[in-house]
Amino acid sequence: MPSQEPVAGLPKPLISALRRLLRPLARLLIAKGVGLAALMELLKEAYVDVALNEFPVDGKKQTDSRVSLLTGVHRKDVKRLRERPTEKMAAPRSIGLGAQIVSRWLGSKDTTDKKGQPLPLPRKAESRGPSFDSLVSNVSKDVRPRALLDEWLRLGVAHLDEDGRVVLNRSAFVPEKGFEEKAFYFGRNIHDHLAATAHNLLEEGNPTLERSVHYTGLTDESARELAQAAERTGMKALLEMNRLALELAEKDKGRATATRRINFGLYFFDGAANFNNLRSDSDVPGEPVPEKESD
């Protein structure tokens, strides 16, 4: 007699959602040579860590047996994983510093035009005007502006114009190159998006923002036009949020209660209507469906 399917008896809407969201992850992992065994080890690690830190029993010690019962991870693996040092995901230095500099570049009236777009900056100060070197120095005295500029040129974050001024390629810190940098954003942004949606599914307090607009039955030309519109409108929203966040962060600096982290993001997906052969009943051609509460 065949063994029962592991997903039998679980909420069907949740299983359907998991099947869908796991496919692009599986595609990435296969392309990068990450096999199932490696993913299973990471999943075990995540299950044990979450069980230990987010499902405690009041007044009782978390035992290996209880964690095993909660997660389905074997007790031997629970013990092994509990004894393993925790590895924290640290941002590459180029990202931590680079994101701060870009935020200030986009958040100051001195370094943006009337539409809020970043102005090209001379390498060094000319009279009393802003420069790339002064912008870097105002954020950190520990890094040479030339070294950071070379890294930005390598990553495709900026380029030099015909006058030798530094020009941002995008109104955000988004490296075109550099696998380490892109992998960091992949982990952080997808984590935050999933955390927001999980919060809503679990109905843990007030729902968080998570909305999107999606259509099917579009031509390539229409999809390209919508992609351009998404870039324009999306960057307008991000620039506005950046200016407000920068202003509030300066006001909150040094306060004991300044312990919160936020992440506001936008994305645009363009693919075949039957992408991954997982067409949803809600994907009706021509029907806009603004989803509730998002990231």
Image (tube, helix red, strand yellow):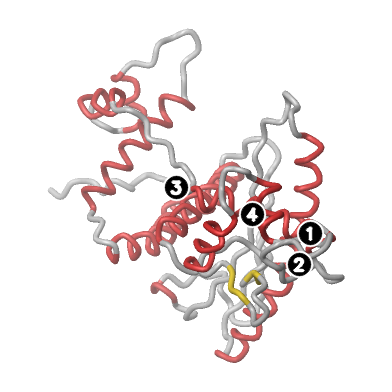
Q: Nearer the viewer, residue 44 or 291?
A: 44
Horizontal placement of 65 versus 14: left or right? left
- Mark 4, residues whose alpha carbon is within 10 Å: few (<14), some, or many (≥20)? some
Q: On the image, numbered disc 3 is attached to which residue?
A: 11
Q: Are marks 2 and 4 in contact (CB under 8 Å)?
A: no
Would you place residue 115 above or below residue 107 in this image? below
Q: Which mark is residue 236?
A: 2
Q: Residue furthest top?
A: 59
Q: Nearer the viewer, mark 2 or mark 3?
A: 2
Cα distance, mark 4 to mark 1? 16 Å
What amino acid is at disc 2?
Lys
Would you place residue 240 above or below residue 262 in this image? below
Tell me the element at label 4. loop
Would you place residue 161 above or below residue 78 in this image? below
What amino acid is at disc 3?
Pro
Q: Are marks 2 and 1 in contact (CB under 8 Å)?
A: yes
